[in-house]
Image: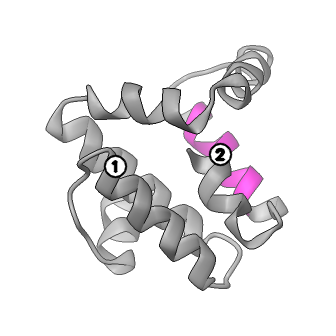
Amino acid sequence: MATVVAGADGNVSNEETALMAIELIRFGVSEEKSQIIMKEGLALSPAEACVIISKMTNEEKKYVTAYLGTMICADGKIEDSEMKAWALISKICNLPTMSLGDAIEILGKL
């Protein structure tokens, strides 16, 4: 879903791609495995991804919400199309509501 939010403005920036890589590294994923994960993630349809996210625990959903919100800010431009994508994903997946500031703060504390 990160690529859906990042690409909602028609462009996935280097900063957005870097955030995706940083999060994989944070989870201890090697560069080799991160390429596999990215490939498999891109192969998922948004609907499939929403089903997976919807089944997550509340704490996992909080992380997903914070991650997607931070993704919107990664390139320094808050685009309306990205905000709309975040809101729609949040609604479909029953994610907690939070501001972009909250998202950045939560992700920064991990």
**Position of residue 11 measured from the top left corner of the image (x, y, whole percent):** 83, 66
- Name the residue carrying label 1: 92
Disc 1 and disc 2 in contact, CB within 8 angstroms: no
- The three-letter amino acid code for the residue at tag 1 is Ile
- Going from N to C along the chain, the mark reached first, 1 or 2, is 2
Magenta region: 16-24
Query: What's the residue at 72%, 28% (across, down)?
Result: 38
> What distance separates the C-alpha of mark 1 from that of mark 2?
22 Å
- Predominant secondary structure, magenta span: helix
Q: Nearer the viewer, residue 3 or 31?
A: 3
Quarter of the image for residue 69 reads bottom left
Drawn side of residue 17 relative to residue 95, left or right: right
Q: How many marks?
A: 2
Residue 63, label in figure:
none
Look at the image and say whether residue 63 sits in the magenta stretch: no
Identity, as a three-letter code, of the amino acid under mark 2: Met
Q: Nearer the viewer, mark 1 or mark 2?
A: 1
Q: Which residue is mark 2?
A: 20
- Regarding mark 1 in the picture, which secondary structure is present there? helix
